[in-house]
Image (cartoon, rainbow, N blue to C red):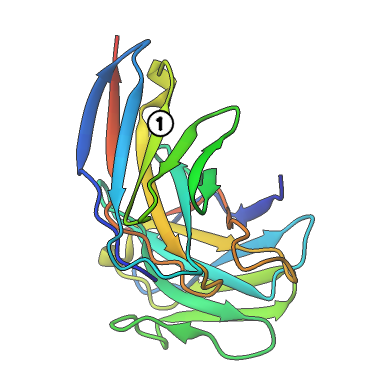
Amino acid sequence: LAKTTQPISMDSYEGQEVNITCSHNNIATNDYITWYQQFPSQGPRFIIQGYKTKVTNEVASLFIPADRKSSTLSLPRVSLSDTAVYYCLVGPDRNDMRFGAGTRLTVKP
Amino acid sequence: GAVVSQHPSWVICKSGTSVKIECRSLDFQATTMFWYRQFPKQSLMLMATSNEGSKATYEQGVEKDKFLINHASLTLSTLTVTSAHPEDSSFYICSARPRGTGMNTEAFFGQGTRLTVV
């Protein structure tokens, strides 16, 4: 599993767009990038996954540049309920599910 | 989406006793399940990978005799914390991927089990 680096924490305000970047310099050709969200005392929840360029769903967008050495999770117009820890995982290996430190996002009123 | 259920959600046990945590995939089969431990304000730490019908693969530093994992069917894996001590108090989480799906299929997580050893 390619190692990932994310900011430890970020603060934002309600209504703002939040972009969380994940660096994965050693990403392999067949690796996908997957983001999970975790609230306190709950298991992580899948947010979005992508391979290249841009992916959008009802919750977020994922931007992946051509070299794929980084990716950016974009949360539009965050609310207080988006306060959580966000993890990016990179890899195709179904049996390697190690998490990095994640980014603790705090949304303020 | 697919559902993974953990039971119990929380448990308090006395030091020296054993505790069993169940992880079930409710609407899919999972050849492989994963067990994590998470301390406050920290990330999930992978403890072991559980394979149906075979022995679990433990991460370095995780005592296999203390954390017994059994994956008896394609929908159930159990983690037993044996001779629990206060330092084993933590949040335990399981996850699973649906069997037979693509390499990039996301994993589904249980709601976690809060273990407190007194």
Residue at 46%, 73% in the rendered image: A96
Q: Quadrant of the C terminus of chain A?
A: top left
Q: Is residue A88 left or right of residue B107?
A: left
Q: Quadrant of the N terminus of chain A?
A: bottom left
Q: Chain of mark 1?
A: A
Crowding at mark 1 (Cα within 10 Å: few <14, some 14-19, many 20+): some
Residue at 71%, 50% in the rendered image: B2
Residue at 58%, 58% in the rendered image: B107
Residue B37 picture location, percent across and down: 38, 62
Residue A106 picture location, percent across and down: 28, 26
The one of A70 and A4 positioned closer to us in this rendering: A70
Residue at 28%, 42% in the rendered image: A103
Residue on which disc 1 sits: A74
- Occupied quadrant, residue B82: bottom left
Residue A68 picture location, percent across and down: 38, 55
Residue A3 picture location, percent across and down: 30, 66
